[in-house]
Every structure is written in C-alpha cells, then in structure tokens.
Image (tube, rainbow, N blue to C red):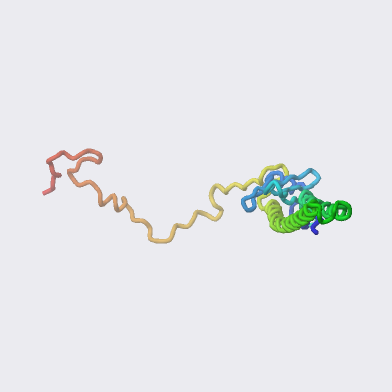
C-alpha cells in the first residue's frame, strides 16, 4: 500500500583523510551542483551530515540525506540513508483514510437511512472510490519520484567528498610549491636544433638598407629630386 518510507543506503569511503579534515572540506565547499540543481550540505562538529534537494513542487517533498562521518582504517567513511519525507507518506495515509471513512459511512446509510433511495449512499460510495484512486496514484508517484531524486542526492554526496583538492583543516588550500629559480644544476640549456643564424644584421635589414644619397630614416625625401647615382 505504500505506507512505509522509501529508503536507500549510502556508503562513501574517503581514503587518506581523517574525520576532522573531511568535516573542514565539507564546510569549505558547502554545496555542489548536480543536473543544474544546487544541493547544500550541513555538517556538525560530531560529523553528522544532512542534505536535502530543493522542493520541486508544493505537493511533493524531495528526499533528504542523513549520514555520519566516522573514522576508518584507511581514512573516513560516510554511512547513512537517503530517506523519503514523512509528508510524502502522510499524503497516502490521508487519501486512503478518507476513502475508508466514506466507505464505512455507506453501511449506516444502507441500514438506517433509507438504503438505495438515499442520495448520500452514492455520494459516499463515489467519493470513496475517487479518494482511493487518488491515494493509489499518490503512492505510485512517490515511488517514481524517489527513484528519480535519490540518485541525484547520492551523486551530490560523492561529488562533495571527491577531495582531490581538499583544503587543510584550517580551511586554507594546500600551498602550491614555488617554481625553481636560478641556474639549473644540469648546466645551461642545449641550443635548439637547426642551423645557427647568420652573422650581421638581419636579412630584411640588409635588403631595406638606405641607398647612397637617401635621406636619413624618418625624414621626407625632397620633391622633384632623385637620389644621386655614383659614377
């Protein structure tokens, strides 16, 4: 009938990092984006982690993550569950409960209120069928929605704990080592492959050298005069 909360266990191992370091990293990042949706994480000093997807609609509550960070042999392990909201289960209880009350109201109408001639009999009967159908659709929608949203929350937790560039416990990133300076211990670098450049000025400079009689570079040549040609 769908009266139980849907659950999905989650276990993530963070190798080479202690609980204090993982807590600092989670607080430093705070949130990740999965499928265009921002998922925020909250962690306590004791290592309790909570996260919830944004509410998709007023009539549907997204699942939430409740987990704990514990120390392990090779680092830290996050263990917990992704659970369906209590409000989702309450919707199923509400519709099925109302359908049951209307169905029970049919019995005294049949016994004491005129039986089939009483219009309340049909109102209660049709109402019970409609509310029962709505409860069935709500239960099926809960199952489909949880199966669609729980993997996003699981993937967000894995992205958050991917600590390749994790900060130090103080909240500052690991310093980048400076580049080496000064002469190389292996000696000067080897010259590049290929022929050595020719001595003297560049080829373009020789081709564009000023001819005898030309004015100095930057000065205009007098109009109507041609450069003197040596005999």
98 above or below 223? below
Q: Specify the quadrant that holds the N terminus.
A: bottom right
Relative depth, front residue between 68 and 188: 68
Residue located 34% across and 56% down the image: 198
Which residue is drawn at the image coordinates 20% and 47% (left, top)?
A: 211
Q: Quadrant of residue 12?
A: bottom right
87 or 229, nearer to the observer = 87
> Where in the figure is residue 186, as x and y percent of width and height?
55, 55
Residue 10 visible within the image: no
Spot occupied by residue 199 in the image (x, y as percentages of width and height): 33, 53
The residue depicted at 13 percent of the width and 48 percent of the height is: 230
Q: So how many labels did they put on this image?
A: 0
Instruction: Determine whether, in the image, residue 33 is placed left or right of residue 99.
Output: left
- Which one is nearer the viewer's eye here, 179 or 116? 116
Picture residue at 66% right of the left edge, 45% below the top: 173
Q: Quadrant of residue 79?
A: bottom right
* Front residue (pair 21, 197): 21
How far across and how far down the image is residue 3, in percent? 81, 56
Name, please, the residue furthest toward the bottom.
194
Farthest residue in the left direction?
231
Q: Is residue 48 visible?
A: yes
């Amino acid at each position: 009938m769908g009266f139980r909360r849907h659950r999905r266990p989650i276990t993530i191992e963070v190798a080479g990092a202690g609980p204090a370091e993982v807590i600092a990293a989670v607080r430093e990042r705070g949130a990740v984006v999965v499928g265009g949706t921002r998922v925020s994480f909250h962690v306590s000093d004791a290592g309790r982690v909570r996260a919830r997807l944004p509410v998709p609609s007023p009539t549907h509550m997204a699942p939430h993550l409740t987990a704990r960070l514990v120390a392990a042999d090779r680092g830290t392990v996050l263990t917990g569950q992704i659970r369906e909201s209590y409000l989702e289960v309450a919707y199923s209880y509400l519709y099925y409960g109302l359908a049951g009350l209307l169905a029970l109201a049919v019995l005294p109408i049949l016994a004491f209120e005129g039986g089939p001639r009483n219009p309340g009999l049909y109102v209660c009967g049709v109402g019970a069928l409609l509310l029962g159908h709505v409860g069935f659709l709500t239960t099926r929608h809960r199952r489909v929605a949880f199966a669609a949203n729980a993997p996003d929350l699981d993937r967000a937790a894995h992205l958050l704990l991917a600590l390749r560039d994790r900060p130090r416990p103080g909240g500052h990133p690991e310093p980048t080592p400076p580049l080496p300076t000064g002469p190389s211990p292996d000696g000067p670098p080897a010259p590049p492959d290929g022929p050595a450049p020719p001595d003297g000025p560049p080829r373009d400079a020789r081709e564009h050298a000023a001819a005898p009689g030309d004015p100095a570079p930057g000065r205009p040549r007098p109009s109507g005069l041609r450069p003197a040609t040596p005999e």
